[in-house]
Image (tube, grey):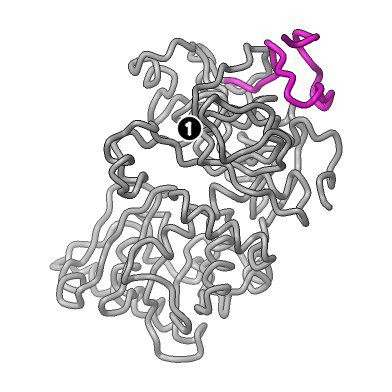
Amino acid sequence: MSKKELYSLGEMPPLGEVPPKMHAFTVRQDRFGEPSKSWQREVINTPELGAKDVLVYVMATGINYNNVWAGLGYPIDVIADRQKKGEPEDFHAGGSDASGIVWAVGSEVNDVKIGEEVVVHSGWWEPEDPWVLSGKDPMLAPSVRIWGYQTNYGSYCQFARAQSHQIKKKPKHLSWEEAGCYMLCASTAYRQLMGWSPNIVEPGDAVLVWGAAGGLGAMALQIVSALGGKPIAVISSEDKRQFCLDKGAVGVINRNDFTHWGPMPNTTSPDYKAWMSGVRAFGKAIWEALGERKNPKIVFEHPGEATLPTSGFVCDTGGMIVICAGTTGYNITLDLRYHWMMQKRLQGSHLANDEQSEAVNELVLAGKVDPCLSETYSFDEIGHAHQLMHENKHPYGNMACLVNATEKGQGKS
């Protein structure tokens, strides 16, 4: 039994002592709306652990767009969704990226030890899911969820509850906030680039990366470069050019130099010729960025509606457009003639499994991938950080908020 009901943030209890109450940032249904208002600090019960669960004393958390959605209550109400599954909580305590210390473990956990410094990857699934138990890719299991978005008690909590398989080693050369901000984007990018054989990054491959200065794109640039590929960055403003070059891009294209974005015109309309002229000019810009007439073997997509018609055209014969989001919209258009005749692949991708998360964490441990921490905020600025992201005013790279860490720069050794 804990000696205190509630500890202040940064006030570390004796190792392994779990207080009944904790600080957390939460959303409730009557607050759905602007993230700066929907996300509020509360004191809630510390979660109980299942047999295969781990409790992490959170030092820092990353900020991801999924919890902008949670705060808005759109496109899904995550609270109602969990209640349909029988979960009793009437709040969402989110957060899908964490660094911290293992504080308690469930009765069947033997691969994680109390006191270890760790990061958490965000792939969650029911341990007894027959698909998972059969040895198949857990990310295709019916029960898969995004930790801290589709599950409760994520990294915006003083103590986060995760499954033991989610726990990975914290890189010692990173501060708590650096370690807390990269895993979701890094593992998602790694699965996109290395999870869909035979369309994986090989030495010399050209890879087009949309939104290259964002958290996801910056991870993709570094992963492609670390694996010997040639990433071409697409940006929306010139102030991001040097950042992308520093993260491994062999060339940079500013999409504002072109005007053909959005749904593709009907192939029989007069507008199609002008649209195709813009697409061909963009393809030529890729060659100029590469320094050779070579089309991308992989197109790393997430804008969706505005860019997919172009991605479908510039992707190489037998190549792959791999997509994990639709930040500009979900209704896509594509000239199927180029798709089937040149035998291209359009592949959806989501999060990452344990092996992929481990592989990308090894790149971070080896110093080959940098977390791209852009800004660190306090715990009480969690709502503010989401508001910046909602308004697209956030700094490029990845944002973090301190939780139990009391100052920036702590945790390096």
Tell me where residue 225 sits by quadrant.
bottom right
Residue kind at label 1, given as amino acid type: Trp
In the displayed structure image, the side of residue 242 where residue 126 appears, left or right: left
Where residue 23 appears, as percent x and y from the top left, is 70, 18
In the displayed structure image, the side of residue 12 where residue 217 appears, left or right: left
Q: Find out whether residue 167 is within the magenta segment.
A: no
- What residue lies at 34% left-to-right and 63% top-to-bottom? 196
Quadrant placement of the N terminus: top right
- What residue lies at 81% left-to-right and 45% top-to-bottom? 411
Q: What residue did someone put label 1 on?
A: 69
Q: In this picture, is 85 found above or below 173?
A: above
Q: Point out the stretch of residues depicted in magenta.
A: 1-26
Q: In this picture, is 40 found above or below 173?
A: above
Where residue 162 appears, as percent x and y from the top left, is 54, 32
Q: What main secondary structure does the magenta stretch of the protein show?
A: loop
Where residue 366 appears, as percent x and y from the top left, is 67, 65
Q: Secondary structure at mark 1?
A: helix
Q: In this picture, is 5 found above or below 75?
A: above
- What residue lies at 32% left-to-right and 54% top-to-bottom? 348
